[in-house]
Image (cartoon, rainbow, N blue to C red):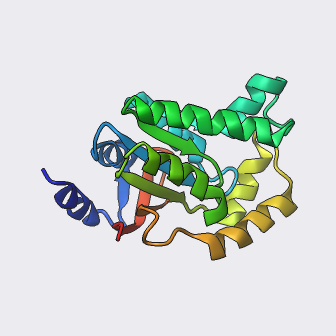
Amino acid sequence: MSKSKRAQNFYMHLHKNTPASKVISWLMNFGSKQLIMLIGLPASGKSLLAQRLVAAGAVAFSRDEIRAELYGDEAIHGNTEEVNKIYYQRIAEALALDKVVIADGVHSNYVVREPVLALAHAAHCDEITIVYLDATVKTCLHRNKRRKRVVGEKIIYELHAQLQTGLPEENEGRFVVLKPGKNIRSYRVTCVRAKR
């Protein structure tokens, strides 16, 4: 089945409660060499989606995990330059090995996304999907309180404002918006936009 046909088939799920397994299968179906960049507020469900994609055969990288490796705790921001260097290096290496690579982070605007997109282009990776986990601020604040690493409420509001003006442009890649579904095992697909 062609890539455009796979994308068209997924349009039928727009605004419907869709099992997570179907969303994962569709995202993984664009080839063995692809970048899936997750964007969204803290506690929006990015890491859960990344775990599901890893279980389906992808490799995932996040700055939180690198900070935990380097400093023993993901809440310790440490040396941002060092963390970013490792993050970009790991993504580049995985893309060079023709992997399905997950970049897990807030990625709230183009300036933050551009270095990762540049790595994909340098690796001749044409399959780029940006997935926005569009949970409400209220939902994220509620979930955030139950997490081990709590992000400040003010930061969540600031990131929300950045995301509202920093969503991906058509030239960045295929764009998919997922809202929380009726339960933890589903999503509502509210937007699928092809790369131009």
Compared across the picture, whether 136 is left or right of 157 comes to left
Compared across the picture, whether 121 is left or right of 158 comes to left
As drawn, 14 above or below 94: below
Q: What residue do we see at 67% from left, 59% from top?
A: 139
Q: Residue furthest front?
A: 122
Q: What residue do we see at 76% from left, 43% from top?
A: 146
Quarter where residue 70 is shown? top right
Quarter where residue 158 is shown? bottom right
Q: Is residue 109 visible?
A: no
Q: What residue do we see at 35% from left, 51% from top?
A: 127
Q: What residue do we see at 60% from left, 34% from top?
A: 89
As drawn, 127 above or below 55: below
Give the image location of residue 79, x and y in percent.
85, 37
Give the image location of residue 166, x and y in percent.
62, 71
Q: Residue furthest left?
A: 1
Give the image location of residue 41, x and y in percent.
67, 57
As drawn, 158 above or below 81: below
Q: Is residue 176 visible?
A: yes
Give the image location of residue 35, x and y in percent.
44, 46
Quarter where residue 137 is shown? bottom right
Q: In which quadrant of the rendered image does the C terminus lie?
A: bottom left
Front in this rendered view, residue 148 or 111: 111
Q: Count the numbered circles shown.
A: 0
Q: Residue furthest bottom?
A: 165
As drawn, 43 above or below 167: above
Compared across the picture, whether 58 is left or right of 147 comes to left
Front in this rendered view, residue 44 or 85: 85
